[in-house]
Image (spheres, rainbow, N blue to C red):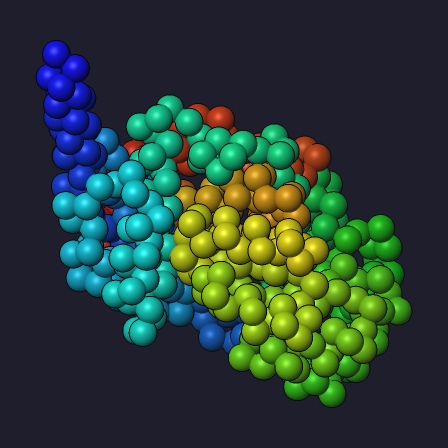
Amino acid sequence: MEQGVMNSEVGAQADVSADMRIREVEAWVIKSQIPPMVLGGGHSAPVTPDSVLVRITTEDGHTGFGDSWVQQTDARILRAGVMYGVRPHLLGQDSRNIAALWRRQWQAVRNHGLHPAVSATDIALWDLRGRVLGQPVSGLLGGPLRSRVEAYATIPWHRPAEEQVRLIEATSARGFRGVKVAVGHGVDEDRQRIVTLREAHPDVLLAIDANGGYDVTDALRVGTTCDELDVRWFEEPVPYTDPQGLAAVGRRLRTPVSGFQSDTTVYALRRYLDIDALSIFQPSLDKCGGITQAQRIGAVLDAWGKRLVPHSAAPPLSFLAALHVSATAPTGGLMEFMVPERDPADPGAYRLGADHLRDASILSIDREGFVRVPDAPGLGMEIDMDAVAELQRRD
């Protein structure tokens, strides 16, 4: 009798496993309502805000969604990466084995750069798992340490300082306590810009981002002004490919040096941590390997006493993924919020492309400058597939 019960249980488990196997992986290009943006400064190539939406469906009909983007390249290239690069490694696999599926994809793509594709599918797998279990992603990650996450505003990039002064005033009125502006336009111009912004807004938490536009010598010249005027952090003062240069800048400045937005996976941390190159780490969940890797990165940073501030100028589902990770990471609690327009009607409304979400308000900041962590299953949003179909027709 016991043997019969045991065999029955094994059979039931096998059926469940089969039901949760991945039947299909689909991907669509999502056009953003924001036109390509020239960031200026140390990063002068136009950024295209189009993204790729991914849906993973199991044999029993459960679905999960993720997304990513490639910023300076036609989004159809990323869609092809999903469909032909990682999809074959997911079909027929048990969707519950997220860590194993991440490793399976990583082993297939680690030598040819399909990290945004892996990030999108990984986010979709976490969303799927949360929907199946009726739990938010933050719950799957161990539970939130905070119910909402503070956001700082990244305002339009190479604009006159006087225009940025007005934009900072608008973001402050909306609730943001902190802003980030781009530098890398030249040492003298950057130093004067920092002075102008600080004099106009002495109480704003001001950060700057050079996008790797300087060598060590010029970065230190700009950084001296940062020290004098209490800048919150100096992001990528030299290229991320030069961790030794970042460490050299950090040793000479009181202002914290940040970076890591262009790197991928927890494995890249060692080259920075071994030489104390960064104080603040900013992984992009649309690029670093998704939620699986961001959680691991956060755990290592906690052990090393480093701050996790996700680079979340990102498509909406990647933004939500960063929100869940930041809510659960011990050194999290702060994330980026892109304000890409020169004259925004509402600086606190997400504007990088959310026409396919049934309710984009979950991405908005509140009047105190925070984003509330959704408690609905998965990432906490619903996709309007009719809107997705309409976006494809427009394209």
Q: Quadrant of the C terminus?
A: bottom left
Identity of the residue drawn at 53% across and 55% down = 297
| Side of 348 where 385 appears, left or right | left
For residue 261, above or below residue 91:
below
| Side of 274 where 173 appears, left or right | right
Residue 381 can be seen, yes or no: no
**Viewer-proximal residue, 247 or 174?**
247
For residue 357, above or below residue 222:
above
Identity of the residue drawn at 23% across and 31% down = 62
Identity of the residue drawn at 55% across and 66% down = 269
Corner quadrant of residue 128: top left
Q: Position of residue 111 (x, y in %)?
A: 31, 74
Identity of the residue drawn at 59% across and 44% down = 329
Q: Quadrant of the N terminus?
A: top left
**Viewer-proximal residue, 321 or 192?**
321
Q: Position of residue 201 (x, y in %)?
A: 82, 54
Corner quadrant of residue 279: bottom right
Q: Position of residue 365 (x, y in %)?
A: 60, 37
**Viewer-proximal residue, 317 or 299?**
299
**Viewer-proximal residue, 38 or 319?**
319
